[in-house]
Image (cartoon, rainbow, N blue to C red):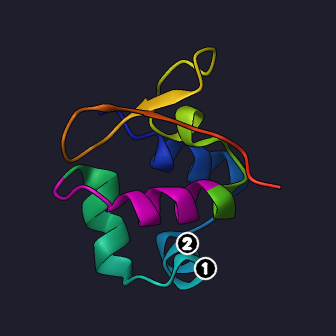
Amino acid sequence: MDLRIKEFMSERNVTSAWLANKVGISKVAVSNIVTGKSSPSLDNIIKIADVLNVSIAELIGEEKNDNTITCPHCGKKIKIEKGE
């Protein structure tokens, strides 16, 4: 999985400390996710995407046209539906 967190953080001029605070995880956890040392939970992927104002598909570097993402833990496709 090709997380684009660092790219979006750079575009928005935000720090890992700011992102960590908004997502509710430690700065070290953000650093580990950005560098690929650890994989975020699906819950944290959703939170990070929301905080950075991007779709989950964009964040994880997948195409948006089929409205699915690949689970970072099991590798299965997950259909994404926007709640109202």
Marks 2,1: beta carbons within 8 A = yes
- Secondary structure of residue under mark 1: helix
C-alpha gap between disc 2 and disc 1: 5 Å
Q: Residue at 45%, 37% (x, y): give it.
A: 60
Give left or right: position of 18 versus 54: left
**Residue 48 inside the magenta-drawn segment:** yes
Where on the picture, by quarter, is residue 54? top right
**13 lies above or below 57:** below
Image coordinates of residue 64 in percent, x first then y, are: 61, 22
Hey, which quadrant is residue 38 in on the image?
Answer: bottom left
Between residues 78 and 12, which one lies in front from this camera angle? 78
- Magenta span: predominant SS is helix
Q: Position of residue 70 (x, y in %)?
A: 35, 32
Q: Mark 2: which amino acid? A: Leu
The residue where tag 1 is placed is: 22
Query: How would you rate the neighbour count of disc 1 (Cα within 10 Å): few for under 14, some for 14-19, many for 20 or more?
Result: some
Residue drawn at x 41%, y 82% is 25
Residue 52 point in image, percent of width and height: 66, 56
The one nearer the camera, 59 or 27, is: 59
User: Looking at numbered disc 1 in the image, what kind of residue is underneath it?
Assistant: Lys
- Comparing 10 with 58, the one in front is 58
Q: Which residues are magenta?
A: 37-49
Residue 1: x %, y % from top left: 29, 33
The structure residue drawn at horizontal position 38% and vertical position 80%, both measured from the top left corner, is 27
The part of the image, by quadrant, that contains residue 28 is bottom left
Count how many numbered circles sit on residues in the image.
Answer: 2
Write down the residue under mark 2: 19
At x 39%, y 57%, the residue is: 42
